[in-house]
Amino acid sequence: MICSSSLHVSGSGTRNSPSPPSSEASDEPVRKIKASPQLNRWSRARTIRSGRKLDRSTSTESLLTKSGSLPVRSQPEIESLLLPMSPPNNKRDSRSSSSDDEKEGNGGGIPIFILSDGTGWTAEHAVNAALGQFDYCLIDGVCPVNTHLFSGIDDVDKLMEIIKQAAKERAMVVYTLAEPSMAQSAKQACQHWGVASNDILGPLTEAIAGHLGVSPSGLSRWAPERQKTPLSEEYFRRIEAVEFTIKQDDGALPRNLDMADIVLTGVSRTGKTPLSIYLAQKGYKVANVPIVMNVDLPKTLFEVNPEKVFALTINPVVLQSIRRARAKTLGLNGELKSNYCDMAYVKEELEYARKIFAQNPVWPVIEVTAKAIEETAVIVLRLYHDRKNRCSMPRISKRY
Amino acid sequence: MICSSSLHVSGSGTRNSPSPPSSEASDEPVRKIKASPQLNRWSRARTIRSGRKLDRSTSTESLLTKSGSLPVRSQPEIESLLLPMSPPNNKRDSRSSSSDDEKEGNGGGIPIFILSDGTGWTAEHAVNAALGQFDYCLIDGVCPVNTHLFSGIDDVDKLMEIIKQAAKERAMVVYTLAEPSMAQSAKQACQHWGVASNDILGPLTEAIAGHLGVSPSGLSRWAPERQKTPLSEEYFRRIEAVEFTIKQDDGALPRNLDMADIVLTGVSRTGKTPLSIYLAQKGYKVANVPIVMNVDLPKTLFEVNPEKVFALTINPVVLQSIRRARAKTLGLNGELKSNYCDMAYVKEELEYARKIFAQNPVWPVIEVTAKAIEETAVIVLRLYHDRKNRCSMPRISKRY
């Protein structure tokens, strides 16, 4: 169980079945969740299930603003509001069914709470990248980590509830909160409860504001004012790129190669498909053309602008092992499997591809062995932009 | 031209055709670019094209370490090395072909340089999110911004060259540099040249190190030691999820619905495909089933665990406008177009879907109007994890 459901359950039967609106629920403060009516109902039910109302007298509920506004409080005021809370880990919630909530809640991993007033994907991405610095002890399980993403945190009530929970679970808190008073409250609450914390976007936003000479809006993604901002043209371009790319996958519709921004080619299992999709998510229309020994390539591949074609190659030993795993997944029969995965065949097919690449010297040949898709993607895009813009200093430029 | 190619071109003809290795190139210090031999050749050619060698006497080349090691220098030492450079914007490069390099290089936008020793996607993601706080002036073009991503910055030489360029272009610098001495050099150089800067991952990595009680490796993604780390199981799971999801798109292979983690359903243009792909990138196997009026749905949709089915709905006026744009893109003929985009038909089809949803009350109905894919994704995943883990406090948990 990667959660701590036992902490707040107020009674039996309330957790697994959505509670109908009751008189207890009707005086629930108005919450600002942006979702369908169904979701709002879910959210209300969840609030009831959480038993939060029962908590009021001894918790931080006094920080709540029922009007939904987010007042900035002075440090002493915040502190005086925080004081009634029991210090983390010294006194257990008497309703708790387990005395080991923190460990249970995180399956033995060290917890990191990710809080956001938007989706939280930015903070999750940053945490994921930062954890790359601890690969050496994550991989062998020396310090397993559990991240917990809490998105759409749009009022101080929820914010305090989660930070309080972080203190209980001995988690650190990483947050992105656009509203300055929310960010300030998070910082103060974490300090007060001794929770390590990090504001991912605050310092960057401030630096950009200084650079642009304008102020940030301070509006979270879910704020009604932000909702009015129409989805941008660039957004729809990205959606279109994904749809285009899916349709062209695996050599389908070779007649459309000229409509692609980027064409990838290489033998089976060089990662053309996931790379295509990754690039498509960034707004590039991608087509990929598989190279199979003794199968003619579509002539359009040689007719399109060669500057947009990228060839992928890979170490034969690695390719063989990937193909073996693939054949197993697909449940290929012995005969096809031996052909597809046979080392002599693998080498011959790579050599066949190499000759095609040599005949098209404008195509850069990218070695993908041991590279993650994200890494190959940056190489492709650097070359793509470099060729397009002829920069002395290769860069991937984007207009906002 | 979203670059500043004019600054470093040393002579005619060297920019558009790769230069052959020359005696000038052969005493080039060994560079640590990780790429195929082809790319290394490209990189060398680019170095020649950039005319960097000619720069040495008056630039920061003296900061270079030919051994490839990255010594930590004292502040006065760094400053003394930086002093020979001409102050930004006071004295122009005499070889520059334009006196308006900064503006030309950014198409009139305010430049932000993104530097990384890895791919740079984390920093780009953060900058993109932070720029959301300036929507109000970006959208109407009051303060257009140009970001420039420089990835794989793995030596002080390149780092200084780019920061120097940032000073020339009056750009701010946002960076993720794992090697502490590189991050320190970036900070000092930015301070020295009066360039606003922000370290995206440094403070977060430090906070996580404190929380885990272990030290960060300080290795960039491109460091040979990091390269030895095998791609994780989770990485291959993500690739598999993307491949699965593409194959199931648009109701293909309904017999595989039971193998999906998440099944999306809704009428055409509710964003099922891009949402599926977005979720797949996060490691979830997704299938999507389109609802078309008077077309039977696959019976497997009603046989799978209803807790993994998510229904999408949308405002009819918005749907009509999206369908109109779609019909235009597809070049649909008048008859089909009028049916597909006709308001009466759109409403009727949404009502048809609504009835199906009502018959399957376990499926949550998610309203996608005006929501970006990322926002719908977080709603789906929150419900998905909530149902799976029955948490009192809805969270999306992940193990590292």
Image: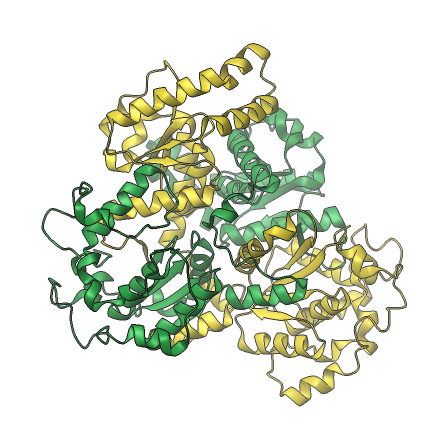
Chain colours: A yellow, B green
A109 sits to left or right of B57: right
Image coordinates for residue A262, horizontal then vertical, percent: 32, 38
A364 and A187: which is toward the camera:
A364
Query: Seen in the image, is A133 located left or right of residue B89?
Result: right
* Residue B193 shows up from this direction: no
Is residue A42 visible in the rendered image? The answer is yes
Residue occupying image coordinates x 21% and y 59%: B4
Residue at (72% x, 69% y) in the render: A161
Q: Position of residue B43 (x, y in %)?
A: 28, 46
Classify B336 as above or below B197: above
Decide if residue A15 is on the left or right side of residue A207.
right
Please state which of residues A176 and B223 is positioned toward the viewer in this rendering.
B223
> Would residue B220 be found to the left or right of residue A6 on screen?
left
Nearer-the-camera pick, B279 or B20: B20
Q: Image point 49% across, 26% down: which residue? A: A317
Q: As rendered, which of B396 and A224 lies closer to the eye? A: B396
Question: Within the image, what quadrant is residue A152 found in?
Answer: bottom right
| Residue A349 spot, x, y in % from top left | 40, 19
**B275 versus B76 height, above or below:** above
Q: Is residue A289 above or below residue A217?
A: above
Rendering coords of residue B245 (x, y %): 54, 34
